[in-house]
Amino acid sequence: MRRQPLERVTVRAPAKVNLHLSVGRRRTDGFHELTTVFQAVGLYDELDAVPADALTVTVTGEHAEHVPADGSNLAVRAAALLGMETGRTPNVMLTIRKGIPVAGGCAGGSADAAAALVACDALWGTNLGRAELGKLAGRLGSDVPFSLHGGTALGTGRGEQLTPVLGHGSFSWVLALAEDGLSTPEVYGELDRQRESGPVAVVTDAAGVLAALRTGDAVALGHALSNDLQPAAVALRPQLSLLLEAGKQLGALGGLVSGSGPTVAFLARNDDHAVALAGALQGQGACRSVRRADGPVPGARVIEVA
């Protein structure tokens, strides 16, 4: 029996927090060798894919004006790549509703790319499966494979080589959003500059984070959080140091700049503590806005078809 063509597919994809991020030296291909532990958290972008006469994208939500709406958009690139690989003309209208901070180090663009792969695969009936979509995701960006799979994972290489991390329990996060975004290449460039001008600590061991995840120990996880990019992000946005200190003084189990920043992720003891911590940070005016999210959560998933 022939399947009726779908008129619309809606996919939801989560934000990520890097619980550990060790950055090696710049490779000959321009990328840095990474060891990172990702966790997907319940802050989402949603993407609609609808058949159209051409490949287009529209972006709505906070700071949507800073997201490209042309061929450089990662979701557009994802749809075009899937079309090329499957022999489909990628005539699709993509609509992205941003819930993940823009330029916040939470992989919002990667989430959109993963959502586009899943949505177009369903819309076109190409049925590639997660493994094949994962290969395409790795060609689009270092964080896209994780946005596709979600959960908690150890990433190596550029971060695109994933190994699932088995853990227990759920963790309550408070994401404090700074006023201005940070460019990921700019932050990596600042780290390289710092390393050239003097010794900068390099975190090489994710063992503490992995052990805490295995036991579900939030206190141990808070102590183990680490990010090699944090000194560079703080150098570019000095107010981040004040935000990190504010979270510490308010009883966060741990806090760190998420990825390349400028979002700061604080680990709370539980949901009630997360509500109190978020309210206190907001009340102090330490950041532009605050979001709460639990993790881990699944990666990009279809939530509606029509």
Image (tube, helix red, strand yellow):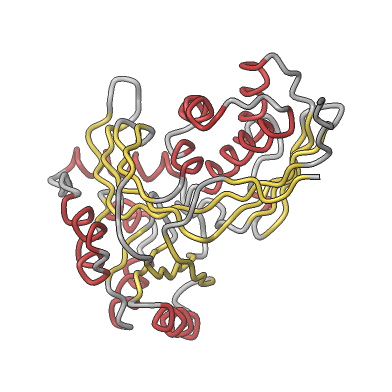
Seen from this angle, which residue lies furthest front?
1
Seen from this angle, which residue lies furthest left?
199
Residue 256 in the image: state x and y as whole percent.
32, 62
Residue 52's place in the image compared with 203, above or below, is above
**In terms of depth relative to the viewer, which is nearer, 66 or 117?**
117
Residue 196's place in the image compared with 199, above or below, is above
The image quarter containing residue 24 is top left
> Looking at the rendering, in which quadrant would you find the C terminus?
top right
Relative to 183, is 125 on the left or the right?
right
Relative to 26, is 54 on the left or the right?
right
**In terms of depth relative to the viewer, which is nearer, 11 or 287?**
11
Residue drawn 48% across the image and 65% down it: 178
Residue 234 in the image: state x and y as whole percent.
33, 58
> Looking at the rendering, in which quadrant would you find the N terminus?
top right
The image quarter containing residue 187 is top left
Residue 221's place in the image compared with 155, above or below, is below
Residue drawn 42% across the image and 50% down it: 151
Relative to 146, is 153 on the left or the right?
left
Residue drawn 74% across the image and 24% down it: 90
Relative to 34, is 297 on the left or the right?
right
Residue 12 in the image: state x and y as whole percent.
62, 50
Residue 156 in the image: state x and y as whole percent.
29, 35
